[in-house]
Image: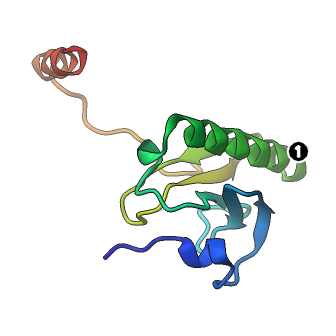
């Protein structure tokens, strides 16, 4: 079964915690993409960010924003990039990665789709 972050929320796994409130924990990533890479997770386990109800989702993004603003002012970085993968770890979480320029985190560029494939996708998504 895939991992959750419940041990982090309980404080059983010793990580470098950056911030905490009733609903979230922010901590330094154990295997950072860049120095200062922070992970924010929900206190209650949800399979992914899309499984949070509307209020929990709003709380998560407000907390992420607070942590990211703190990062931007305290670290030498131009931007804080967010990553939500949600596959390997079955616990709603967001990665916050301090960056100074393009290319410092993996990109999202794949092969272009054909015009027909794009039309088909748009039709499915609009229906």
Res 100 visible:
no
Report the residue marked by disc 1: 73
Give the number of marks.
1
The quarter of the picture where the N terminus appears is bottom left
Camera-side residue of 114 and 96:
96
Give residue 66's position: percent from left, percent from top.
78, 43
- Identify which residue is drawn at 35% across, 73% down: 2
Q: How is the image coloured?
A: rainbow
Res 67 visible:
yes
In the depicted structure, whether residue 92 falls above or below residue 124: below
Residue 72, quarter of picture: top right
Give residue 8's position: percent from left, percent from top.
62, 75
Q: Is residue 93 left or right of residue 80?
A: left
- Identify which residue is drawn at 59% across, 37% down: 55
The quarter of the picture where the C terminus appears is top left
Residue 47, quarter of picture: bottom left
Give residue 15's position: percent from left, percent from top.
70, 78
In the depicted structure, whether residue 11 falls above or below residue 27: below
Q: Is residue 94 left or right of residue 16?
A: left
């Amino acid at each position: 079964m895939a991992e959750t972050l419940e041990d982090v929320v309980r404080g059983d796994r010793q990580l470098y915690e950056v911030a905490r409130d009733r609903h979230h924990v922010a901590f330094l990533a154990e295997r950072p993409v860049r120095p200062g890479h922070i992970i924010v997770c929900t206190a209650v386990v949800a399979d992914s960010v899309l499984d949070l109800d509307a209020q929990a989702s709003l709380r998560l993004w407000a907390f992420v924003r607070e942590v990211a603003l703190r990062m931007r002012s305290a670290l030498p970085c131009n931007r804080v990039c967010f990553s939500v993968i949600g596959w390997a770890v079955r616990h709603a979480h967001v990665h916050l990665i301090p960056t100074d320029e393009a290319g410092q985190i993996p990109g999202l560029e794949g092969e272009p789709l054909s015009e027909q494939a794009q039309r088909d996708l748009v039709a499915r998504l609009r229906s």
